[in-house]
Amino acid sequence: MIVILLSGGSGMRLWPLSNEVRSKQFIKIFNDPTGKRESMVQRVYRQLKTVDPDCSVTVATARSQIPAILNHLGKKVHISIEPCRRDTFPAIVLATAYLHDVMGIPEDEVAVVCPVDPYVELGYFEALKRMDAQAAKGEANLVLMGIEPTYPSKKYGYIIPNDCGAVSTVKMFKEKPDAAAAQEYIAGGALWNGGVFAYKLKYMLNRAKELLNCTKYQELYDHYEELPKISFDYAVVEKEPSIQVIRYRGEWKDVGTWNTMVEAMHGNTLGHVILNEQCENVHVLNELEVPVLAMNVQNLIISASPQGILVTEKHASAHIKPFVGMIDQRARFYEKAWGEIMVLDVGESSMTLRLKLIPGGTFRYHRHELRDESWTVVEGTGEAVVNDQTIPLHPGSVVNLPRGCMHNLVAYTHMTVIEIMCGEKLSDDDYIKFPRDEKRPHF
Amino acid sequence: MIVILLSGGSGMRLWPLSNEVRSKQFIKIFNDPTGKRESMVQRVYRQLKTVDPDCSVTVATARSQIPAILNHLGKKVHISIEPCRRDTFPAIVLATAYLHDVMGIPEDEVAVVCPVDPYVELGYFEALKRMDAQAAKGEANLVLMGIEPTYPSKKYGYIIPNDCGAVSTVKMFKEKPDAAAAQEYIAGGALWNGGVFAYKLKYMLNRAKELLNCTKYQELYDHYEELPKISFDYAVVEKEPSIQVIRYRGEWKDVGTWNTMVEAMHGNTLGHVILNEQCENVHVLNELEVPVLAMNVQNLIISASPQGILVTEKHASAHIKPFVGMIDQRARFYEKAWGEIMVLDVGESSMTLRLKLIPGGTFRYHRHELRDESWTVVEGTGEAVVNDQTIPLHPGSVVNLPRGCMHNLVAYTHMTVIEIMCGEKLSDDDYIKFPRDEKRPHF
């Protein structure tokens, strides 16, 4: 099976565990079967590989998510990079063209598109396999997943099928009805639209030709910003007469808000947490190294990270977005291809960061014009190159990096480095890359 | 007036704003008349100086509190250092001997002893002045403050006076009665014992002679550890037949727990806090740089510091002590005579600290055997001396301090330095002072 995982999302609704760089699918809140913590994207990938070990996975995402994708999934996945955010139709077309032009997948093959963040059981991915097989038959242009509803939700789109078979054609779609209408649809056999669909590559390339007048990956990539912001549902699904739907019955949670997220969590606490016996229905997620102590509180979600602290009644947590909008969202922790960064301190014209590099983790050779930096190694070994001079690094090594000097960093082992920046302007823009030089390690 | 302020206390009940080093009297939670934040000890000192500008203040305290005392009160106060914690009787005797032997105050003068942490109005300090004048008359050996009770508290000791005059003799004492008995005492004119008393120095020195067989400051100081752990109430007050009590009527709050503390607070929030409109009766005290967001919560105290995070129902906050006992209490922020320290990161064998030095702030010349250090200046100017070599410091300066090297630090202006320690053993014991050398700056 060839799968495209759509990885979008912003960091608002699960603040402070998410931020402008870490979307919800990268929060390690779940447990894998061995008890190890895993993120949503790791869980979905593990489940996909369980039902189909040969499954080829391409993640369609923004450039900013690439480090996190690599850290969570390694280099086992392909990545279709969206140069900027358009809606789902351009993203799916770009990923489909990537499969065809870059990966060389023939246009008669089927792709299955799936969001990266459903909290589901394995049966969901078995249904994906059935969708793949069904699309391969070519009886319809598009095969959708219909999720059997458990209550008359007003949040979802409904698919009204022509019959109650395991595979059926579609009569019509209904977007977010009121509860009464939803009740009526469900009585008539309606299904939730889970945003999962399978198609042959050529079908999507034809839609691209028709709607975007372009089917070539490179061209789509280069002109991505000019593509219309249009959803796949609107551009394709609602206009397509030849659609089949395959039923899925089983756990399906849309864990996009705190109160739904904690329901999917294993246990009530994560991290260093003390609850007294009088606490009831409390979930605490603490990513700080210092403890959270909660006493005699009920129906709360408490979450702490280097980004901030949230204390909210459970239902109110769904309405967090406007308040998070009031908060400075500059990320205080984020992942990089070489490891992770945590901001320890922000001064008037300084910043102290903790860099954790993975073995082999490497910075590109670069310099800054407006800031001095220093690196102090506190754990692990590696080397730095400063103005073409190699400096071996071990715990206690201090490297002085005055502005203008070229520098990079390579970790031999897991390595922790405290980086201190000093300068009038501390900006990501003040980063001048050295022209690639194959003699030097780089990412 | 000569005042001895008893400054004791541990950091348990107001965790996480207090810790093993910062007792509650050093939390800057109140507002002075100009709106500037002030601590309990600053408030009491300011009030004392308001009613008696010539007041001489001696703080009786442990060595560990000296930096905080100096930072909060400057060098305007005298300090009687308790070499270890004994109870109030040895502390008061030592401070009295300090007044007599070190400060040269004649034994016929009066001292007024007062706790450092009452939350009171100015009238309380006016009462102190009346106590001072009354004790000077020599009608009784001891003059106590009796606080007019506002409710039949079971927490306090009661003084039963012989009459209802502004000054009266004492019939008896009753320690922490039940509510019914308290009610009865109050009906009979009883007063709360506020732990404030005035006496002539010679009276206390006589008690010391009698009970400790010693009245000399240096001798008391040198053998302090051998003195009995005994309270002033038990050793002196309860056995003294010649006592007068002076009434105080007015605000008197014992702000020793979170729920009483926040009642004395100006406003509901401190620091970077966002409350939605549905929050009711919530106090949030945030000493972190990142925000606390609270939504739809009621009757809570939320407090965050580098030490940890507390979320508690208000009344439950009084029962925090056993839970704090479960938490690693190594201080993550504390004051020094030269400024303040905040722990930014703790690694397996490393620690990153932010040092904020005040102008003129100076480290003693010292070295470590088991750790390398580095200093990076991120704000201000100063100088370091490393192995007798002077290094000028400005933002961006990096000083490498391999183990064994002698070093000190002097701030010319306000100066912020990131210090990184690396070593197998990071202990306060690994600190070898250079013999004092008057040519070098030192504290």
Image: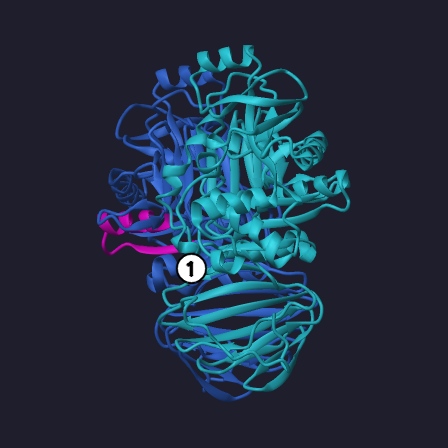
Chain colours: A blue, B cyan
Residue B277 shows up from this direction: no
At x 65% / y 65%, what residue is drawn? A426
Q: Which residues are magenta?
A: A40-59
**Above/below status of A350 relative to A181:** below
Q: Is residue A198 left or right of residue B242?
A: left
SS assignment at label 1? strand
**Above/below status of B147 relative to A328:** above
State which quadrant residue B341 falls in.
bottom right
At x 50% / y 89%, what residue is drawn? A389
x then y, percent, for residue A145: 35, 36
Task: Answer whether residue A52 is magenta in the image.
Answer: yes
Magenta-highlighted stretch: main secondary structure?
helix
Crowding around mark 1 (Cα neighbors within 10 Å: few <14, some 14 to 19, many 20+) is: many
Viewer-closest of A443 and B392: B392
Viewer-closest of B385 and B158: B158
At x 44% / y 80%, what residue is drawn? B403
x then y, percent, for residue B418: 56, 67
Tally of numbered tags = 1
Task: Answer whether residue A338 is magenta in the image.
Answer: no
Question: Looking at the picture, which amino acid does disc 1 mark?
Answer: Ile
**Above/below status of A29 relative to A263:** below
x then y, percent, for residue A25: 42, 47
Q: Is residue B441 left or right of residue B347?
A: right
Instruction: State which chain disc 1 sits on.
Output: A
x then y, percent, for residue A87: 54, 45
Residue A290 shows up from this direction: yes
Q: Quadrant of the C terminus of chain A?
A: bottom left
| Circle 1 residue | A79
Viewer-closest of B300 and B436: B436
